[in-house]
Image (tube, helix red, strand yellow):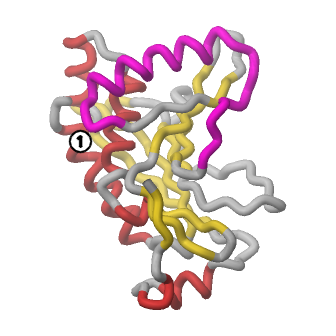
Amino acid sequence: MVKKLDITNWNRKAHFNFYKNFDEPFFGLTFEVEVSNAYKHCKKEAYSFFIYYLYAALEAANNIPEFKHRIQDDEVLEYDKVNASPTINRDNGTFGFSYMDYKDDFKGFYEEAIKEVDRVRKANDLVPANDASNTIHFSAIPWVKFTAVSHARNYKFSDSIPKISFGKVYKKEDNMFMPVSVHVHHALMDGYHVGLFCEYFQKNLNKEF
């Protein structure tokens, strides 16, 4: 379900009008999250750690209204939920884009995600059948403990979809951490909202789905 936001009475009207026409309206923040509990839980239950933290991130984003806003023809759309479009790494060194619907229950999401990962790994194409704007672009870079990320973008096409990247899991003392990079459209949200995502994502990683 989607509806148009009333920009006239929106508390971000001035921010939207200021940033919407920037040549580069996206800004990014990089932070780390502790994944010790999540990693142990996945080992115990034989879950894919990638799909587990992907769901934790997607669930966090769906609890923040600004992560569900998109710009279309100078208007702002409000989606009731956003889904995942993560890159899937292949054994031959390439990757493919995938599409996964968000579900309220982790196990339902997990079952469909496992099938989608398998489909993309067996395929040779790049772009999935679904490229709707009510998605979040996710990517995993498990070989690098990065401190910053930039993204390839085509400026000829309007884009307001958040981009979230996950890096290499590493151990520090007795705990495990993972770098996370979040890029979002400044006309739709600020550092405060990325901070909320960081907080909610960490809370999800600390509990068990």
Residue at the location (55% across, 57% down)?
Answer: 183
The spot of residue 48 in percent (x, y) is 37, 17
Residue 147 appears in view:
no
Instruction: Please indicate whether residue 139 sits to the left or right of residue 109 in the image.
Output: right
Magenta stretch holds residue 77:
no
Instruction: Please indicate whether residue 42 sits to the left or right of residue 139 in the image.
Output: left
- Secondary structure under badge 1? helix
Residue at the location (40% across, 50% down)?
Answer: 81
Q: Nearer the viewer, residue 176 or 120?
A: 120
State the residue position of label 1: 204
Residues shaded magenta? 103-132
The spot of residue 124 in percent (x, y) is 75, 15
Q: Is residue 208 above or below residue 121?
A: below
Determine which quarter of the picture holds residue 71: bottom right
Query: Residue furthest toward the left?
Result: 207
Q: Quadrant of the C terminus?
A: top left
Q: Nearer the viewer, residue 55 or 143?
A: 55
The spot of residue 119 in percent (x, y) is 58, 13
